[in-house]
Amino acid sequence: MLRSTTSNWFGVAPAWLVIGIFGLLPMFIMLAISFMVQDPYGGVEWGFSTEAYVQFLFERDLDDSLILNTIYVNIVARSIGLAAMTTILCLIIGLPVAYFIARQPEDKRNLYMLLITIPFWTNLLIRTYAWILILTRNGVVDARLQWFGFEPGTFDLLYTNTAIFIGLVYSYLPFMVLPLYASLEKMDFRLIEAASDLYASKWQAARHVIIPLARPGIVAGSLLVFIPSIGAFIAPELLGGGKRMMLGSLIYFQFATARNWPFGAAVSILLMAFVMIALLVYARAAKGQGLPAGGH
Amino acid sequence: MAAGQSAVEARGISKVFPGGVKALDDVSVTIRENEFFTLLGPSGCGKTTLLRLIAGFEFPSAGEILLHGLDIAHLPPDRRPVNTVFQHYALFPHMTVAENVGFGLRMQGRPKGEIDRAVDQALALVKMADYGARRPSQLSGGQQQRVAFARAIAPRPQVLLLDEPLSALDLKLRQAMRGELKTLQRETGITFIFVTHDQEEALTMSDRIAVMSAGKIQQIGAPLDIYESPVNHFVADFIGDSNFIEGAIDTIKGDAAVVKTPDGIAIAARMNGPHKAGDRIAVALRPEKILLGAGKLKGEVREAVYLGTSTSYVIALGRAVTLSVREANDLSGKARFAVGDTVKLDIPAGAARMLAD
Amino acid sequence: MRQPVGHYPGLRLWTALFFFFLYAPMVVLVAYSFNVNKLAMIWGGFSTRWYVKLFTTGGIGEAAMNSLLVAVIATCFAVAIAIAAALVLVREAGFRGAGLSNALISMPLIVPEIVTAVATLMFFVMLKNWIGFDLGLGNIIIAHCVFCIPFAFMPIRARLQDMDLALEQAARDLYADAWKAFRFVTLPLLMPGVVAGAMLAFVISLDDFIITQMISGPGTTTLPVYIYSMIRNGITPEVNAASTILIAVSTALVTVYWYVSRPKKT
Ligand SMILES: Nc1ncnc2c1ncn2[C@@H]1O[C@H](COP(=O)(O)OP(=O)(O)O)[C@@H](O)[C@H]1O
Ligand SMILES: [Mg+2]
């Protein structure tokens, strides 16, 4: 219209420069590095190798034969399992909450939204750290139990899968409630009246009206919870004690201590593959529903 | 027409939007200095597009637009001495009324004293002198409309473009504003190009009307010409109500002809275009021009709908022709005929008009 | 009494429990930061001694300064870049690169943080080894800028989408050239979106831990990285105090923003 195409590119050029060079390019370099050879002093040596990917499934014996190694497969299974469970639990907790808030008068709705956004914008590290105080031996809960005569350590969940699970749900619950609320808030509540007018019971109305209408929010919220959960680092590190690794901590470990760049890069690529699959599922679910095609 | 008289002239304008919509198709029109010119047509016919081309928000795919003889088709809007009153006013919400009205002059870099004077004048003209310090959100719809108008005339444009400026107002206000706009146009002497889909608005305010349909201009003329002498089916149907009767020309005598329907009903009609006896044509006939109670034709009342000041009948003539007829009610307010009555009717010479298509 | 249609029993209680779950850990943390007892878990009475200790031990001041510096600069760049991009991507209907540009801008939202972190780390190490490119704190600012752009972009784009194009056309109609129309009409009307975008970018930058942890070196520690190193050294009351400060800052920012941006009743 008023501006030509050249000046259009001019407008998006800064974004392309910054994200392209410092966001996208490093991803491609990482892909390349995943096919290189480890340099024991950190960094990489030139040369093509699929060693990093082989290492994921097999261990090399002294005579160079391959033995199946399930450590990393276990980590993948734990990551996917915990992320899926986190997503489902967040949905179960979040849907009734979002529905309740969406039915409040406007003033209250806004206040509830503020209360949900505060944790959303509060540092994840700190929010996770707070759970250490609660879950640990002699922690807030255990200490109360001791008052009632229980043994110290009766309640000690720290460094368990359960602890990681609680931490993940706690971390990403707001990511689920916000999109759920966004789709329920737009809902015309007369539709529920119409359903009950047409002989639907409460639960039939929930099943056939509310949940279908909340679907865009369910799909978006699930994506927003699943992606950061599967790559989580803070919760497994602080609440799993770094022993019960997830993909995020495995990657971190390759750079912080093991100094195995190609392997770390390969695991990152694997994680990206899971994210892509989740995005594809989302895109399919979102199709024809007027959902935004991207993530957040 | 002398060249000096033309304010805006569009020559062979076409506009194709990306995606292939042809909004304007070879439109040519000349708008005279100081006239109140209306673009009238159903929604989607390209009125707004033509206006936006004159304002400079879009550029034509073909053709030229002359302003006082100079081609302006490729100048940006800020370089055209033409201002727009937007459909939903587009008042700047973050500025006061006075700042809104003064915006154009400020952008032109006029001295402050001059701006202030022009703002006061423009606001006085639209009877909003006391509202300069308010924000647009603190005004009613009608008041916003006045401010939008003041803002557009404050820089004294040569041509003012108005895109359905009254459509957002309620009926009473809309009717009142018609008179005011007409008066303002006369007082300021600015050429108005007014867009509407409301025929009543167009007929009451305009010096001339261009009736548009599907990206083309169908007819240009004074309100009386457009109403009394529609050139084609579209214009006759869009402006007011019409009966359309098909038949063949029986005899021609100068400007008058007799058209016979297949049933053998003879109707006197005015000629339109070069036709000869035997041609199959259609005539348009206004319901209020048909006289009931006397005449050579005979019909049966099928429907009678009371409309307050008048009654609308549907009358069957023979098997194939039904006419809608409107007649003013008499002093008692009652309709003269009832369903089932047989009535005589007369179509006076000159009431029916042949159509070009 | 009959309940109205659409009402389900227990929702209020469920929501109350939800908020308890959301806030209890933070409340515990804040409470323990005021615990006089050295043993973090045993309540000994109210005291602010850990805050005093925190500020006298040093290190944290520098970390806080770094955090602030990084957040302010990254936010400024991100907002400017986001405005330029949004103007094109929202307003120019036929722009060919729109789909790709939108995808690029939302990329940092989709990639897990840990992946961004290690990819950025490797990239910076290579830049340093090969061409000697190392800006120290500047590296962190660049990395933050990348993931702040989408957060700045979203509210700015939303605001622009809601804005009536006719307003800018009216400005052009009234003799404003392209720049003046932007300066006097578009930008002032865009301001709420700009402020929201800046707020989001700022908080996101201030909160970032994983990416900064990966690429920061000596002298470029930020507050979350500093707190993490404290946690690694054991649960101490100072960690609680430092965490409480960060919670207070986020809460204050979000609440202030909420009050400012709330739709006003007339
Ligand atoms: N920016 C645009 N892009 C594509 N098509 C358009 C655009 N603006 C208008 N049109 C199309 O052009 C035709 C004429 O539109 P318009 O001039 O707004 O009609 P009117 O004002 O008479 O209602 C319509 O079919 C409309 O859909
Ligand atoms: Mg229009």
Image (spheres, rainbow, N blue to C red):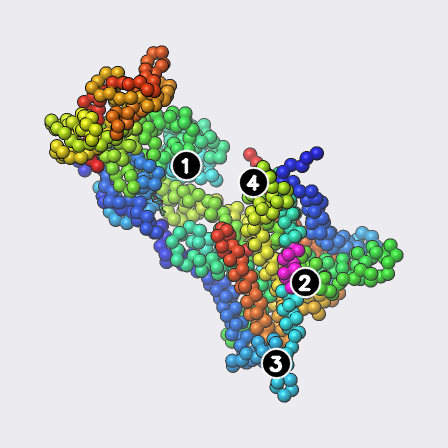
Residue B265, percent across and down?
20, 26
Q: Tell me the element at label 3.
A: loop
Residue drawn at 52 percent across, 46 percent down: C192
Q: Name the residue: 70% across, 58% down.
A: A166
**Residue at 12 percent of width and 32 percent of height:** B277
Q: Chain of mark 3?
A: A
Circle on res. A40 = 3
Give the secondary structure at mark 2: helix
Mark in the foreground, 1 or 2: 2
Give me the chain letter of mark 4. A
Rendering coords of residue B76 (x, y %): 32, 47
The chain holding disc 2 is A
Measure the C-alpha gap from mark 1 to mark 3: 70 Å
Asked if both marks, 3 and 2, belong to the same chain, the answer given is yes
Residue reaching furthest to the bottom: A63
Tag 1: amino acid: Tyr
Seen in the picture, residue B255 relative to A56 is either above or below; the reply is above
Q: Quadrant of residue A66?
A: bottom right
SS label for mark 1: loop
Is residue C148 positioned above or below B229 on the image? below
Q: Which numbered disc flags the more N-terminal residue, 4 or 2?
A: 4
Q: Which residue is mark 1?
A: B89
Magenta-drawn segment: A81-90
Amino acid type of the residue that numbered disc 3 sits on in the rendered structure = Pro
- Determine the CA span between mark 4 and mark 2: 41 Å
| Residue A41 in which image quadrant | bottom right
* Residue B128, position as x, y percentages in the image: 42, 28
Dot 4 alpha-carbon crowd within 10 angstroms: few under 14, some 14 to 19, many 20 or more: some
- Quarter of the image for the C terminus of chain A: give it: bottom right
